[in-house]
Image (tube, rainbow, N blue to C red):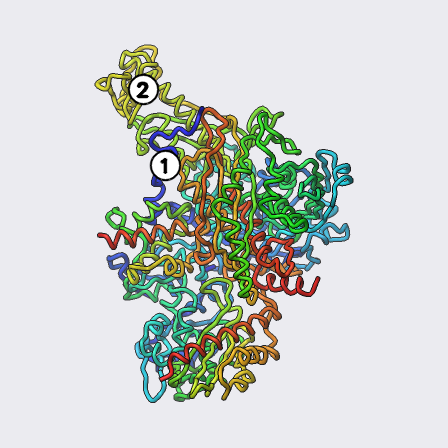
Amino acid sequence: MKLPPVDYEAPTTVSEAVALLAEHQDEASVLAGGQSLIPLLALRLARPAVLIDINGIDDLSGVSAANGWVAIGAMTREYVAEDSGTVAGAVPLLAAALPLIGHEAIRSRGTIGGSLAHADPAAELPAVARALEAEFVVRSQAGERVIQAADWFEGYLTTSRHPDELLVTVRFPAAAPGTGVSFQEVARRHGDYAIAGLAASLTLSGGAISDARLAFAGLSDVPVRAASAEDLLAGEGPSAELFDEAARRATEDIDPPADLHGSSDYRKKVAAALVRRGLRAAAGNAAERQD
Amino acid sequence: MAGIVAERYTGASINRSEDPRILTGSGQYVDDIKLPGMLHAAFVRSPMAHARVLSVDVSAARTLPGVVAAFTGADLEAMTVPGPDQLTVLTGGGGPTPEYTLLATDKVRFAGDPLAVVIAESRYLAEDGCELVVVEYDDLPPVTNASFALDPGSPPLFGNLGDNIVRPHSRHEFGDVAATFAHADRVTDFRIDVHRHQNVPMEGRGCVASYDADLGVMTFYTATQSVHFSKICVAMRLGMEQDKVRVLAGDIGGSFGLKIGASREELAAAAAARAIGRPVKWVEDRGENLTASGQAREESFDVRAAVSNDGDLLGLDVKVVIDTGSYPGMGTMIPGIMEEMLPGPYKLAALGFESTAVTTNKAPYVAYRGPWASETFVRERALDLIAKDLGLDPLEIRLRNAAPRTDPPGFMITGRPLIGVTTRESLERVAQVVDFPAFRRRQAEARARGRYLGIGLATFIEAAPGPRSPDAAGDSAGGESMRLRLEEDGIVVLFTGQMPHGQSHQTTLAQVAADEFGVPFEQVRVVVGDTAVVPFGFTGGSRSATLTGGVALHGARQLKAKVLDFASHLMEANAQDLQITDGSVWVRGDPASAITVREIARRAAAGEFAAGADANLEVEAAFDGGEAGWSGGSHCAIVDVDIETGLVTVERYVVAEDCGALINPAVVEGQIRGGVAQGIGAVLLERSAYDEDGNFQSATLMDYLMPTACDIPRIEIEHLQTVPLDTDVNFRGVGEGGMIVAPPTVVSAIEDALSPFGVRIHEQHLPPARILELVAAADSGQ
Amino acid sequence: MDITLRINGATWTGSPAARTTLADFLREDLSLTGTHLGCEHGVCGACTVIVDGRPVRSCLMLAVQAAGREVTTIEGLAPDGELGTLQQAMWDSHSFQCGFCTPGFVMQATALLSAHPDADEQQIREALAGNICRCTGYQSIIDGVLLAAERARHR
């Protein structure tokens, strides 16, 4: 399982990187943490002509908070985000999801931007980004543009990033007071990709749900929001009956994929359980955070 | 009464002598070997399950810089001697012999079947070369399940066989089957399916082949369970005299039955090395290991049980079809052992056993830790299902059916004597440790809160190596030899054909020999892994504790006698008055007379001997197993089944085991725990999956799921006080037991957890989706 | 491309091909064969080394990416031949059998105990869940780590 022949570039600035992308377009793969890309190369499933290794670009890492947003540089390692007090305080849903990503050694190298650019629908970060409506800042030789999460994820391992664009920053909105979160996942083993996962966020205001976000991992070729369940929850007081109904709504129209780890029907059943559990946990956390 | 000879070392968990190198990364595994000029091999493998090969063109590969050679299957035919796999010839179970070439030539028979090999300066370049090989295939309908393989209309995999039956249907009866079934209160029948899963040692197969053209000698480094078996296979295939092949093995990263004989790829690498004149290394990667090294356990059973209303299992009538995959391996040998073992430690009065083995377009069936284990699964499942029908408790039904230990011993209906079997004791010990009534109370409380806990029990025996058959002259697994020598520097060296791959023989055999001979543990060295110096042998079948432990004990005793005889000349004393203790020889009662063993050895080597003294301080010992015996035990698992997700947690696991006297308790416990982990893995996680076209779907560790530290609980182990059978050698094997009995234990617990839903389980693999299906099906009355 | 990195305290310069993984570079170019290849797709953990203080799967890093980094392999833990606390505790606990997974476990556990010297059993299990062992069922490995932690506390 050795990597195939490939050319290699190691730009040290974003402009060098985007110049290389402009030159090579979809013949190039961007190498960030490598925890998803290198296995694909080793299995010879990915055959780029050139690897553009962005690990040497210093200004792509970092976590900073400003104006109600937390900006995370694309090359920020997952373990750095996991250890970040800013993330823990301002983006609790992200903080809840990070420890579930693979294993510690994966998080040593894996990056926030890399995971989101790879866009595996069974991974944790895409569901978090979709739930929170994160913003994706990409840069090319033409300049910068911002892509909303709803538009970022296009298909299985496919994003709306153009081949000449580099993801440089991901911005997450800071959680409002009274927000409780939960990341639930059913995986075959600790650390595995989710067979089904749920990123849940509830904001309580005066005892009622003022904002509900539910995004599934592993149920489609992209992370999906459970919009009709979210609509049901808005304005209501948390209760077991409400959550049961939300679970029903969240799963009645989905058509999850079948694979070695679960049939479509199985994923549907599990998704419903995750909604019940996720809402219960998020509501509990929200009650704690009310100030 | 003879018991364990627990002097200083035997019976103690001595630290392993293997560990200093293991813990510092200085082990020598086959991929660590670097020889000057060494090249690397990679194989071109079929993506199709079943196809005619129309052409193989390696010309582009040959021109890639860094590629030194590329050989097709046809090229290899010209470089090797055709004929059946030697290991199958040695161990084969009867039935027609399929004819096929070393690498595929006219046909490919499973996805992953090797058809060409590229040899290059690095593995990277060899794989690049493989991508340039162009193969034209003509699709054939794949035979991907046993029922199609049984159909005479299925396209035969092998040209010389008219069909896909590689071990024809046979039926044997023991006891009066017809009468037993006719007079039984009830007869139940059901099907049991065991799924395909596989060994997955952390190190795959591999070799480095180096041919010296001047001497005509092939030096073959390999990962194996027997250097001598490898030698036989290499010599035959390369048309070489046996004494021109030397096989060497260092540290081996696990095997569990996989690495026996020489694989087709290893033989191709050896032939290539000879042709090219440079050493060739082939080490399989994980994809190859999962796809092509071989798989096991795909067996389906139709079972009829004759039962009394009180729960006596009177008779079993079992029909098995074994899916042996493509190329011949162990699959045809399995039915015989299954048949012999089916009665287990129970008072079964009648057994009917029918078997057929078929070939299909999947990876070959290989031995996997306790290859016959499905017989225990079938028997224990049968008892649980019968217990449920009759409203009996699983412990109760087993105690009722367990054969009593009598003197003279009773016999299994299939022939072997049930000597020294402690089934009743191990079941009772498990019950003491686990407190079933307390669990039942906790289970009821949990159910009231919507949580599903379950408890499962199973018991087994394994021939480790098993008692003498009444009609056999010696041990059925062949005796064991050992050469023991007192070296000039005072080290007692044991040359054994054992090939440890995790069993810690370099420690355990030294413990036995040190105690018997009278030297410190550090003064014994165990030599393995070189056909030039070790006697014939192999590691497998849970036989080494008895056979090799025994030959080490008797051999050390013989060597001691020889050394004392020599010493008696030096010390001018009678040999009977001499003893060896703590590394010195002395006259009993006279400590001042002590001379170190080292000094004796030095003098022998220096030629200081009196007339008549035999200074060649070496013996060749042999041991037939003595009174041998069964190992066995009872296992109990407590599980928590989440019926919303189907995820199962094994909360507690208890073992009461009897493997006779223990040489090294920590080693024994490690073997048991590792086997149990594999059993838990088989039930909850592991499956070698093919789709209906024969495409292999578990080719990475993201798809073939191995149990991790979060999946295996602490495994509590009780050691039973054993029934000694032999004056000296009461060690019995334990390597396979955990894997044999853990699957029915865990399945039994899951079934118990789901009993409020009326679930009955007739299969071994229970991933989360399947658990939910079983609950839903039972709910809807299916 | 020429790279310089620190391996086990010494400075090494080499010229690995860009596609060579750090694992292969260690094993082939530097003859540090203690780091093992169990899967080459980042699942089994046998190839785990420590890079700049963090556990990393060396099969998922290119050798060229280690330029300027501090890498510790299993060979670097007991350079003078004397076993460290963790290795000794694992020896005393009969942690391993065939030894193939061992270097990865030792490196992962080393990283764990540096960051969490008081890790309890559950934390240890989770931290080691990314390393696969086929021989032991894990209990003996966990016991080795627990023993090492206890001994380190009492030193």
The residue singled out by tag 2 in the image is B579
The tag on residue B762 is: none
Measure how far apart labels 1 and 2 are at the Cα level. Answer: 23 Å
The residue singled out by tag 1 in the image is B12
Give above or below for B728 relative to B78: above
Q: Residue furthest top?
A: B611
Give the SS element for disc 2: strand
Give the SS element for disc 1: loop
**Can residue B440 be seen?**
yes
Tell me if label 1 and label 2 are in contact, CB under 8 Å: no
Q: Nearer the viewer, residue A196 or B74?
A: A196
The quadrant holding residue B584 is top left
**Can residue B60 be seen?**
no
Q: Nearer the viewer, residue B190 or B314?
A: B314
Residue B622 position, x and y percent, is 47, 25
Give above or below for B281 relative to A131: above
The local crowd at label 1, few if under 14, some if 14 to 19, many if 20 or more residues have their Cα within 10 Å, is: some
Q: Amino acid at mark 1?
A: Ala
Horizontal side of residue B564 vs A204, given as left or right? left
The local crowd at label 2, few if under 14, some if 14 to 19, many if 20 or more residues have their Cα within 10 Å, is: some
Give above or below for B97 relative to A256: above
State which chain disc 1 sits on: B
At 51% from the left and 38% from the top, the residue drawn is B542
Q: Amino acid at mark 2?
A: Gln
Quadrant where the N terminus of chain C sits is bottom left
Are marks 1 and 2 in one subunit?
A: yes
